[in-house]
Each structure stands twice: as structure tokens, then as C-alpha cells.
Image (cartoon, rainbow, N blue to C red):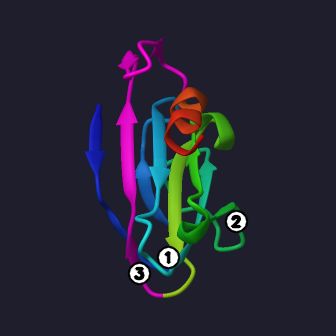
């Protein structure tokens, strides 16, 4: 499992190149920015007309592979630039204080914001 804090701008930025790799992407709570995220079938830059899922840090929103589906993960900031929190893993079992094992990104989302 890897955690990174990539900075994204107003252009689509490639964050995950493996089209099947699990991920969990969120914004730091204090950021005022809104971020758009989408998956695209290849690592080549998607068209500027691509629309994705909007994230708002004030609402504690996040996304994962289960929500966005297969494809390379891209993100862009709607105003300026901002850092995001990106967790990625492949076939990795996650153990939390609840004592449960899961590999589902949905399970992680529920435990984080639930």
C-alpha cells in the first residue's frame, strides 16, 4: 500500500496508471478547492470535455475504484492547484481496528467517512 500527496492543477493529471489497481483519493479537509476526478481508458490525456465526479473537501468527499470503475485515474483542480491524498494498493489485505479484513475500496470509504 502506498500513500502519496500529488499536486494537481487545472489540467487533467494522471494519478493511477494501472487500470485495475485499487485506490482511495480524498482532499485534505482544510483545502478550499474543488477537484474533478475521472477514469479514462488509457494513460493518454483525456479530452478536456471529459466530465467526472466532483469532490468538495468541506463535505469530506472521497472516491475509490468501486465508485469510478476501471481505467486510469485522472484528476484536475477547478481553480488553481491543490494537493490530494492518494492511497493505492494491489491485492493487499487491509486490517483495521474493527478486526475485519477486506480488499474492497467501498469498505475503506465506509470506515473512513462512515
Q: Is residue 86 magenta?
A: yes
Q: Is residue 29 above or below residue 33?
A: above
Real-space Cα distance between discs 3 and 2? 19 Å
- Element under label 3? loop
> Which badge, 1 or 3, comes first in the chain's sequence?
1
Mark 1–mark 3 CB contact (< 8 Å)? no
- Element under label 2? loop
Q: Position of residue 110 (x, y in %)?
A: 59, 35
Q: Nearer the viewer, residue 2 or 101?
A: 101
Q: Is residue 88 above or below residue 42?
A: above
Q: Is residue 57 above or below residue 18?
A: below
Q: Is residue 111 magenta?
A: no
- Element under label 1? loop
Residue sitting at 61 percent across and 44 percent down? 41
Residue sitting at 61 percent across and 65 percent down? 59
Which residue extends farthest bottom? 80
Residue sitting at 64 percent across and 34 percent down? 66
Q: Nearer the viewer, residue 104 or 72?
A: 104
Q: Which mark is residue 50?
A: 2
Which residue extends farthest front? 98
Q: Position of residue 93 (x, y in %)?
A: 38, 15
Q: Which residue is mark 1?
A: 11
Binning the other alpha carbons within 10 Å of mark 3 as few (below 14), some (14 to 19) or many (20 upward) gives some
Q: Quadrant of residue 3?
A: top left
Q: Is residue 89 left or right of residue 2?
A: right
Q: Which residue is mark 3?
A: 81
Mark 1–mark 2 CB contact (< 8 Å)? no
Check the picture and name the quadrant holding the C terminus. Answer: top right
Q: Which residues are magenta?
A: 80-104
Real-space Cα distance between discs 1 and 3? 9 Å
Amino acid at each position: 500500500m502506498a500513500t502519496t500527496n500529488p499536486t494537481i492543477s487545472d489540467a487533467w493529471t494522471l494519478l493511477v496508471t494501472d487500470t485495475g489497481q485499487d485506490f482511495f483519493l480524498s482532499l485534505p479537509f482544510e483545502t478550499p478547492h474543488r477537484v474533478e476526478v475521472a477514469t479514462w481508458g488509457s494513460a493518454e490525456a483525456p479530452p478536456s470535455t471529459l466530465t467526472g465526479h466532483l469532490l468538495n473537501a468541506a463535505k469530506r468527499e472521497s472516491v475509490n475504484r468501486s465508485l469510478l470503475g476501471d481505467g486510469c485515474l485522472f484528476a484536475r483542480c477547478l481553480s488553481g492547484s491543490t494537493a490530494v491524498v492518494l492511497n493505492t494498493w494491489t491485492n493487499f489485505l487491509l486490517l483495521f481496528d474493527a478486526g475485519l479484513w477486506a480488499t474492497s475500496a467501498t469498505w475503506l470509504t465506509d470506515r473512513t467517512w462512515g
